[in-house]
Image: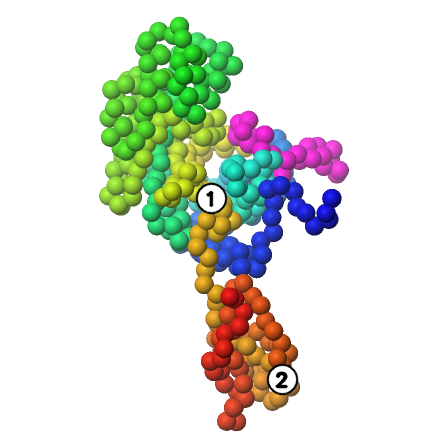
Amino acid sequence: MTAWLLPEGFSDALPGEAASIERLRRLLLDHAAGHGYELVMPPSLEFVESLLSGTGQDLDLQTFKLVDQASGRTLGLRADMTPQAARIDAHLLNREGIVRLCYCGHVLHTRAQGVYASREPLQFGAECYGHAGLEADLEVQQMALRSLRLAGFERLALGLSDVRLVRGVLGGLVAGPGRLSAMLEALSRKDVARLEQLCAGLPDAQRKPILALCELFGDASVLEQARRELPRRAVVLQALDDMEQLARAHAEADCAVQIDLADLRGYHYHTGVIFGIYAADRPDALARGGRYDEIGASYGRSRPATGFSLDLRELVRLSSSAPPRSAVRAEWSAQPGYARAVRELREQGEVVVELPPGAAFESDGLRLDRALSFSQGRWQVSACEPAGAP
C-alpha cells in the first residue's frame, strides 16, 4: 500500500482551503460572541459512557472506541460536540439562568454521513441552555441562518419538524420494539408501501394518522392540514402551535419555510422542534439543530436546551473559492531600513512575502501584485507583474 494514502473519508486541507476554513471559523466565532455565546473547548476523547449519555444508538454507532491504557476503561473519540457542551453546562459551569456556549473542533465518524461527506468534519455549533420558550429556538435558528449567509450562501430555506408529533401519533400504539423501529425507519424514508404493511390490522384511528405523516410536507399551510388529520392530543397540538409561531416569525424575516412532519433525524435524541437549513439545488442540509431538553439529566442536572451545528469544511467545499489576497513581494536585503520597512508594512495589515532575488513564487491564496524596493532614497511599495495564484 502506498504510504501517503489516507483512509477513505479523510483528507488534508491544503493552503487555499485551510485559509478559507480558518477565515470562516473566525467569522462565525465572532458572530456567536456578538450574541453572547462563550467559547468552550472540550477534549477529543472522553470515557464513552459520558460521551454518549442520552444520545441514542445513532451516535453510538458513529463513535470510534478504544481502550484507555491508563484506566482500562473504554474511551470514545467524539462524533458530536453537543453532548460535551451539555456536560459542561450541567456539570462544570452549574450556572442558573440562561447559558450560551459555542465551540469549533474536529469530530470523527465511523461512517461518512453523505456521499461526499468527510469522516472528520470541523464542527461549529452554538447551544442555548436554561430557557424552554420558543425565543431560544428562534434565536438559534436565526443564528444558523446568519452563519450560512456569512459563509456565502444566500438562497436558503428552513425545514421545520417536531419529534413530539410522531411520538404523539404513535402514543398508545401496541407494538413490539422491532415493529416500532421498522415504522420509524419507514416514516423517515417516506416508504408508504412498507408503512402500510406495518400498519395492517391497526384500527383506522391509529393507522390513518401514521400514514398521513408521510404526506404532510410542504409550505406552512401543511400545519392546518395536520390539525385536521392528526389526533387532537395535547402534545400534538402544542407541537403544531410552536411550529406555526416559528414559521410566522421566519416569514416576517423573509425566510422560506418548509414543513416535513416525517423528518425523524435525531428522533431518540431530540425532544421538540428540530430544523435543517438547505441551499438551492443541494439535497442535504447545510446546518441542523433542534431542542434536546433531556441530555443534561444524564450529567445530574436536567436543563432546557436547543442549538445547531454545521461542518466548516463542507461549507468551504460547497462555496465559491475566495479571490487570492493581494501581497507585497520583498527581496531579502541587508540594506539599512529594509527590515523596518517590512515590519511597518506588516503592522499595517499587509502580507509581505520575503524571497531571494529572482526566486519563483507559487501560492493558492496569495497574489504578489506589488513589490518593495529602494527608490529615491527610501523604501517604497509599487505595482508589479502579479505572481502567485493563477
Left or right: 234 with respect to 381?
Answer: left
The residues tagged by marks 1 and 2 sit, at their Cα atoms, a distance apart of 46 Å
Q: Which residue is drawn at 68% across and 47% down?
A: 5
Q: Quadrant of the N terminus?
A: top right
Q: What residue type is labelled 1?
A: Leu
Find out whether residue 370 is within the magenta segment.
no
> Front-most of 306 and 285?
285
Q: Which mark is residue 333?
A: 2
Q: Which residue bears the numbered disc 1?
A: 310
* Rendering coords of residue 377 (x, y %): 52, 94
Find out whether residue 76 is within the magenta segment.
yes
Please tell me which of labels 1 and 2 falls first in the chain. Answer: 1
Neighbours of disc 2 within 10 Å: few (<14), some (14-19), many (20+): some
User: Which type of secondary structure does the marked residue at label 1 adopt?
Assistant: strand
* Rendering coords of residue 118 (x, y %): 55, 43
Q: Which residue is drawn at 49% across and 18% down?
A: 181
What segment carries the magenta color? Answer: 52-77
Q: Residue 118 carries which label?
A: none
> Front-most of 220 and 387?
387
